Image (cartoon, grey):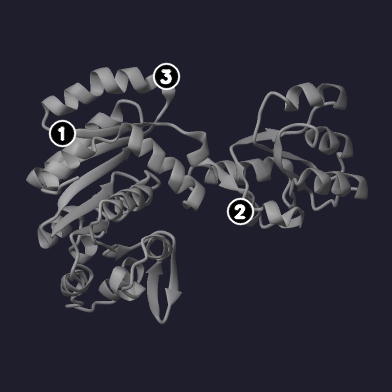
C-alpha cells in the first residue's frame, strides 16, 4: 500500500480537483483507493457535533468511499485552536490521525491524503504538512497555482520543508502566454534543483467559472426564472451600463457571460438576451418587466435579482471567480487536462505502482 499526500502552497490551487482526478485514474486501473483529509479547515460545516470538510464530503461521493466523514476528517482545526487557546493540554490530534488512517487504508492499494490550505497550516496542533508526511510515510505531491516568478521560489521552499518526502510538483493555471517560459525555462531549472514537475496545466476559463446557482448565493439573490439552468457555468462578466445603440455590438464580444445591469434597464436586458448570455443579474432589487422574463424563459436564461448595486455585485462575483468548488463538469475538464499533460509514468514509478 502506498500513500500519496497532495498539498498546496496557497488556497484555491486545485488540490481537491487533483485528489479527485488522480483517485479516479487509480480506480480506472483497478486499484483500491482510500482518501482522507486529516485537517479540516476551509469550506467546513458542523455535522453530528463535529467539523466536517465539504470538500471531503464531495470526494467521498465521487470516489464511492464507505468510511464515515468523521474518519475521513479526524481533526477540525477551528475547534482545536479554541481548545489549545483555552489551555487544554493533550488533545491527541496525532493519535486521531493515525487511527483514522489505519481505518481508511485497510484493504487499499493507494491512499490519497489531502493537505490543508498551506504547507504550514496545522502547525498549531503539531500537524503541518511535513509532520503528516512523516507520520503516514507518504510521498508528497505539491500543486502550485501560477504566480509569476514567485512560484519557483515557493516550490524551492516546499522542497526545503518536505525534503526526501517530496515526490514532485504540478504548476496549475498558467496563462497561455506564459506557458513557453514555464515549460522551457522554469521547469528545467526546477528539475536541476531536484524538483520534478509532473505537469504544467494551462489556465482554463471553464475551471474558473461559477455556476448560476452559486453566483446567486454569492449575491444573496434569488433566481426569478430559468432555475432549471442554474447549473450552467458563467465564464465571464459584463456590465450593461452603455447606451442601447452600442449594447448589441458590445455584448456580442464575449460569450458564456453574466450580464450585470440595473433592474430598470429593460433595453440592455433585452439586448443581452440576443447574445451568448448564461444569466442576467439585475441589481437594485428592481424586478424586470414581464417582457424580459418572457424572453428569458424562451431563451432558457436565468435571471438573478439582487439588492446590491451594480458596483457591489461585480465586486462580490469577482471575488469568487476561480474559487468555487468543483462540479462534475469541472472534474471532467480537469481530468482531460491531466490526461493531456500529466506525467503518469513518472508518478507510478515513484510510487511503485504499475500503470
Q: Which residue is mark 2?
A: 218
Q: Which residue is mark 3?
A: 177
Q: Which residue is mark 1?
A: 195
Instruction: Give the vertical position of 43 relative to 156 (above or below).
Output: below
Neighbor class of circle 3 (other Cα within 10 Å; few <14, some 14-19, many 20+) is few
Q: Is residue 38 left or right of residue 163?
A: right
Total tally of numbered discs in the picture:
3
What separation in Å lies between label 2 and label 1 (alpha carbons)? 39 Å
What separation in Å lies between label 1 and label 3 (alpha carbons)? 23 Å
Nearer-the-camera pick, 247 or 199: 199
N-terminal of the pair, mark 3 or mark 2, is: 3
Whole-percent x, y for residue 3 in the image? 17, 56
Residue at horizontal 23 percent and vertical 25 percent from the top: 187
**Residue 223 is at least partly visible in this image:** yes
Q: Which mark is residue 263?
A: none
Residue at horizontal 86 percent and vertical 27 percent from the top: 244
Q: Quadrant of residue 96?
A: bottom left
Residue at horizontal 85 percent and vertical 37 percent from the top: 270
Q: Quadrant of residue 174?
A: top left
Residue at horizontal 51 percent and vertical 34 percent from the top: 205
Q: Is residue 105 left or right of residue 300?
A: left
Q: Is residue 40 left or right of residue 278?
A: left
Amino acid at each position: 500500500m502506498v500513500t500519496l499526500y497532495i498539498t498546496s502552497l496557497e488556497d484555491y490551487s486545485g488540490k481537491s480537483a487533483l485528489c479527485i482526478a488522480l483517485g479516479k485514474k487509480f480506480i480506472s486501473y483497478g486499484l483500491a483507493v482510500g482518501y482522507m483529509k486529516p485537517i479540516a479547515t476551509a469550506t467546513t460545516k458542523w455535522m453530528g457535533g463535529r467539523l466536517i470538510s465539504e470538500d471531503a464530503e464531495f470526494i467521498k461521493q465521487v470516489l464511492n468511499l464507505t468510511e464515515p466523514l468523521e474518519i475521513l476528517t479526524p481533526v477540525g482545526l477551528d475547534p482545536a485552536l479554541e481548545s489549545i487557546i483555552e489551555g487544554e493540554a493533550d488533545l491527541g490530534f496525532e493519535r486521531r490521525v493515525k487511527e483514522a488512517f489505519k481505518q481508511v487504508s485497510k484493504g487499499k492499494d493507494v491512499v490519497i491524503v489531502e493537505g490543508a490550505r498551506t504547507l504550514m497550516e496545522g502547525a498549531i496542533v503539531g500537524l503541518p504538512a511535513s509532520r503528516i508526511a512523516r507520520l503516514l510515510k507518504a510521498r508528497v505531491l505539491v500543486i502550485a497555482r501560477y504566480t509569476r516568478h514567485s512560484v519557483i521560489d515557493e516550490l524551492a521552499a516546499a522542497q526545503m520543508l518536505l525534503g526526501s518526502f517530496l515526490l514532485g510538483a504540478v504548476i496549475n493555471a498558467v496563462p497561455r502566454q506564459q506557458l513557453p517560459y514555464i515549460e522551457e525555462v522554469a521547469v528545467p531549472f526546477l528539475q536541476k534543483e531536484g524538483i520534478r514537475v509532473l505537469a504544467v496545466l494551462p489556465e482554463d476559463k471553464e475551471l474558473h467559472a461559477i455556476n448560476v446557482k452559486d453566483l446567486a448565493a454569492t449575491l444573496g439573490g434569488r433566481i426569478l426564472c430559468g432555475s432549471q439552468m442554474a447549473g450552467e457555468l458563467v465564464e465571464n462578466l459584463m456590465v450593461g451600463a452603455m447606451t442601447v445603440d452600442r449594447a448589441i455590438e458590445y455584448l456580442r464580444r464575449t460569450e458564456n457571460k453574466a450580464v450585470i445591469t440595473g433592474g430598470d434597464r429593460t433595453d440592455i436586458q433585452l439586448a443581452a438576451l440576443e447574445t451568448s448570455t448564461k444569466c442576467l443579474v439585475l441589481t437594485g432589487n428592481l424586478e424586470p418587466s414581464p417582457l424580459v422574463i418572457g424572453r428569458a424563459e424562451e431563451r432558457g436564461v436565468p435571471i438573478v435579482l439582487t439588492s446590491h448595486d451594480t458596483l457591489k455585485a461585480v465586486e462580490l462575483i469577482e471575488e469568487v471567480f476561480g474559487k468555487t468548488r468543483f462540479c462534475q463538469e469541472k472534474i471532467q475538464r480537469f481530468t482531460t487536462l491531466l490526461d493531456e499533460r500529466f506525467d503518469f509514468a513518472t508518478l507510478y514509478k515513484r510510487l511503485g505502482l504499475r500503470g
